[in-house]
Image: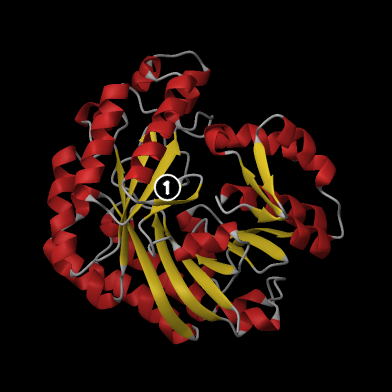
């Protein structure tokens, strides 16, 4: 039986971080309950909504057992705990469910003992923290609400509530970040010893206020205080070395886990396994099609209240697209890709694609398995561009 994942998008935040390029908004908490009601309506009515909306789920997908749930955002920890309970109840009522991992994204300053206990009772097994940095100067420049002390306050609360799987996010490349402050963040992370760690390189694009300011040569949002690309690569490699020494398994370019704590839900994305997304801006994948809901929360709620499917993008995945996804998503995983399997399933020959990359020291091949070279992980995007030319 197929084992699927469910993603629930909560597009609300307390503030908009300067580096954020997601479709999230700062709204009154009075809008939370109507939004949750709409998401539950979509979850419970997805079979009824999909066929008229032009989405034909494979029979195997309709009968799939849901084993992972990821409630992301935005900042889902802003919701009242009863909203989290309601969302998970809707999933359990609507699907055959054998939930082995249920993740809630949270900001440190939103953690309270009562909320944490209620999350665990509702079925949350994993909390993913947007820590980003342990430097208050960097956090303030990035527009974050929390400070270093909030992280230290939140972790014991979660442990006391029974959360045994905590993940920390860090960002390499924030304004005012230095080698010393980055080392401080890594050392403090090590002291708190979360089960999982994600390290992301700061993205500069027009989708964020900071990105636009940098591209326009401005100085707002501490745009002039960004580390160089070489420094960011150095920060990443420093994290890689430290986490390895601490016994974390580096299983995906941006992700490390203590043995057995790899993100089972996110592995579905990288392995091209099926998942359904509910909520404004949520994406879904059936194996043959991808679709996305309307990003605007008001438009999303309005569509569902009118009995309409809130999908605004729908595309069939071509054989070429599927092959490219197999390659770059597979190479993001440190285990690499099985060339013989891909050649057999897609009726292609890949030796010519990988030969020049191997000669340049960008990838390594061991029999049928190809991986990114260990020293090239920080420039993986450049490798992917060359591979997909």
Going by the image, does 115 lie left or right of 142? Answer: left
Q: Taking 153 as reference, is 3 above or below it?
A: below
- Residue under the point 47% across and 27% down: 233
Q: Taking 230 as reference, is 95 above or below it?
A: below
SS of the residue at dot 1?
loop
Quarter the C terminus occupies:
top right
- Measured from the top left, where is residue 70 in percent x and y? 42, 64
Q: Taking 170 as reference, is 366 above or below it?
A: below
Does residue 389 appear anywhere in the picture? no
- Measured from the top left, where is residue 72 in percent x and y? 40, 58
Relative to the observer, which residue lies in front, 18 or 168?
168
Going by the image, does 194 lie left or right of 350? Answer: left
User: Residue 89, located in which quarter of the rendered image?
Assistant: bottom left
Quarter the N terminus occupies:
bottom right
Does residue 254 appear anywhere in the picture? yes
- Residue under the point 36% across and 64% down: 103
Residue highlighted by disc 1:
24
- Measured from the top left, where is residue 252 in percent x and y? 51, 50
Relative to the observer, which residue lies in front, 287 or 347?
347
- Residue under the point 80% across and 64% down: 345
Q: How many marks are shown on the rendered structure? A: 1
């Amino acid at each position: 039986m197929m084992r699927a994942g469910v993603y629930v998008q909560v597009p609300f935040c307390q503030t908009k971080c300067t580096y954020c390029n997601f479709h999230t908004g700062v709204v009154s908490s009075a809008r939370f309950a109507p939004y949750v009601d709409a998401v539950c309506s979509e979850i419970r009515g997805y079979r009824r909504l999909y066929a008229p909306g032009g989405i034909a789920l494979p029979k195997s997908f309709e009968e799939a057992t849901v084993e992972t749930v990821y409630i992301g955002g935005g900042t889902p920890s802003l919701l009242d705990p009863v909203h989290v309970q309601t969302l998970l109840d809707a999933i359990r009522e609507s699907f055959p469910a054998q939930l082995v991992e249920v993740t809630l994204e949270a900001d440190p300053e939103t953690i309270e003992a009562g909320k944490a206990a209620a999350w665990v009772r509702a079925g949350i097994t994993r909390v993913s923290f947007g820590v980003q940095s342990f430097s208050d100067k960097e956090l303030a420049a990035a527009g974050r609400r929390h400070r270093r002390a909030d992280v230290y306050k939140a972790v014991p609360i979660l442990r006391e509530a029974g959360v045994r799987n905590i993940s920390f996010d860090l960002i390499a490349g924030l304004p005012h970040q230095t080698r010393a402050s980055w080392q401080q963040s890594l050392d403090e992370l090590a002291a708190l010893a979360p089960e999982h760690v994600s390290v992301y390189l700061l993205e500069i694009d027009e989708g964020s206020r900071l990105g636009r300011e940098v591209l326009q040569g401005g100085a707002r949002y501490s745009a002039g205080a960004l580390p160089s690309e070489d420094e960011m690569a150095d920060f990443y490699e420093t994290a890689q070395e430290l986490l390895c020494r601490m016994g974390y398994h580096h299983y995906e370019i941006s992700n490390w886990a203590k043995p057995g704590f790899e993100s089972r839900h996110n592995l579905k994305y990288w392995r091209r396994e099926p998942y359904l997304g509910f909520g404004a801006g949520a994406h879904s994948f059936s194996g043959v099609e991808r679709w996305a809901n309307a990003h605007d929360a008001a438009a999303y709620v309005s569509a569902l209240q009118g009995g309409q499917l809130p999908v605004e993008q729908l595309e069939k995945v071509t054989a070429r697209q599927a092959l490219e996804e197999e390659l770059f998503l597979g190479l993001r995983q440190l285990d690499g890709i099985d060339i013989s399997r891909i050649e057999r399933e897609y009726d292609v020959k890949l030796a010519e694609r990988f030969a020049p990359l191997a000669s340049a020291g960008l990838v390594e091949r061991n029999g049928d398995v190809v991986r990114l070279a260990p020293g090239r992980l920080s420039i993986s995007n450049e490798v992917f561009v060359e591979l997909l030319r």
